[in-house]
Image (tube, rainbow, N blue to C red):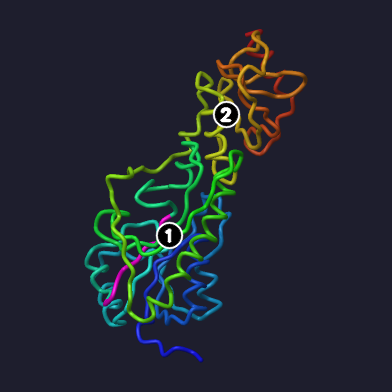
Amino acid sequence: MRLTLRNNTAVVFAYHTVGVKCLRTLIEGGFEIPLVITHADNPSENIWFESVADLCQAHHIPILLDPDLNDSQLQDRIAQIHPDYLFSFYFRQMIPTQILQLAKLAALNMHGSLLPKYRGRVPINWAVLHGEAETGATLHIMEVKPDAGDIVSQEVVPIGPDQTAYEVFNEVSQAAVIALEKVLPQLLQGQIPRTKNDLSMGSYFGGRKPQDGLINWQASCHDVYNLYRAVAPPYPGAFTMLGVHQLVVAKAQKILPNSLPINQALGLGLFDGKIVGCCPDRGGLWIEELRHHESLISPQDLQKLLNTFTNA
């Protein structure tokens, strides 16, 4: 027997794969969604993720692309809906207080970490970069300060020692669905479980830019490998420079400390006919795919490049 739903109207701000999965969860869970606000895809960005706009089109849900969130007309439109909830799923803008206050019951955001750890931008990439053994998805109350509101639901995701951020992201996306599904029955009855989000137990992290993927070959092999994992494709990738040539490490394995010969030059080079990156601890990367723009660099190609700089 289906429950009588009394608190099931929501306006949703969503983008990316997490946006698609969580929005679909709301639809299948019985929420009425009169409006979705999403982003237009940036043609200069590598669009490897799912489309919220396509999902809305399939379900005949009205959408707005990148409206001015401070526009009084948008706020009036949301106010006329009288939403029980506002949801934000991987939406890329801070939602103003005057919109958050339009939710009769709560404004809720899904964040890709185990709050209060890794508040802020690209939390999965930061967690992998720092060698964390776990992360997760957290549904929390939205406040003016980002990722600071009470925790409503949380799901843990282990991080394997060789997983890339992309692989972890796929698992966190599914964890977000689980975290949302766990509390949907309560939300539909107007009940919002809340646990204090103790900000003293975590830190805030900012965004990352493609240039942050520059490899420091003076670092430990552990740190270099974590950088590779954190930004491996479809993210922009860890890279090294040979003169003006930016070479991206698209696929690699870790070389443990003291595995490379003592006379192996630091940085990019060749060992046993394979491309490697060497660190001061004599560990580093076995580089299975090295790319220059869209071209794959073979060991022979790299040797020619290295010869060019040696003979210059």
Q: Which residue is found at the position 27% from the left and 45% from the top?
A: 200
- The residue that mark 2 highlights is 246
Q: Is 183 placed left or right of 46 in the picture?
A: left
Say if the magenta span includes residue 109: yes
The amino acid at mark 1 is: Gln
Q: Which is nearer the eye, 25 or 57?
A: 25
Q: What percent of the width, then of the height, locates residue 231?
A: 53, 40
Q: Quadrant of residue 193?
A: bottom left
10 Å crowding of disc 2: few (<14), some (14-19), many (20+): some
> For the stretch drawn in magenta, what is the main secondary structure?
strand
Q: Is residue 141 above or below residue 221?
A: below
As helix, strand or loop, the secondary structure at mark 2 comes to strand
Q: Residues at badges 2 and 1 in contact (C-beta under 8 Å)?
A: no
Q: What percent of the width, then of the height, locates residue 62?
A: 44, 78
Question: In the image, which disc is placed on residue 251?
Answer: none
Q: Which residue is found at the position 47% from the left and 53% from the top?
A: 136
CA–CA distance between discs 2 and 1? 40 Å
Which portion, as a residue range, is magenta? Answer: 104-111
Q: Is 311 placed left or right of 30 in the picture?
A: right
Q: What percent of the width, then of the height, locates residue 150?
A: 30, 60
10 Å crowding of disc 1: few (<14), some (14-19), many (20+): many
As helix, strand or loop, the secondary structure at mark 1 comes to strand
Q: Quadrant of residue 290?
A: top right
Q: Earlier in the sequence, mark 2 or mark 1?
A: 1
Front: mark 2 or 1: 1
The amino acid at mark 2 is: Gln
Q: Which residue is found at the position 39% from the left and 76% from the top?
A: 186
Say if the magenta span includes residue 174: no
- The residue that mark 1 highlights is 154
Q: What percent of the width, then of the height, locates residue 251?
A: 66, 37
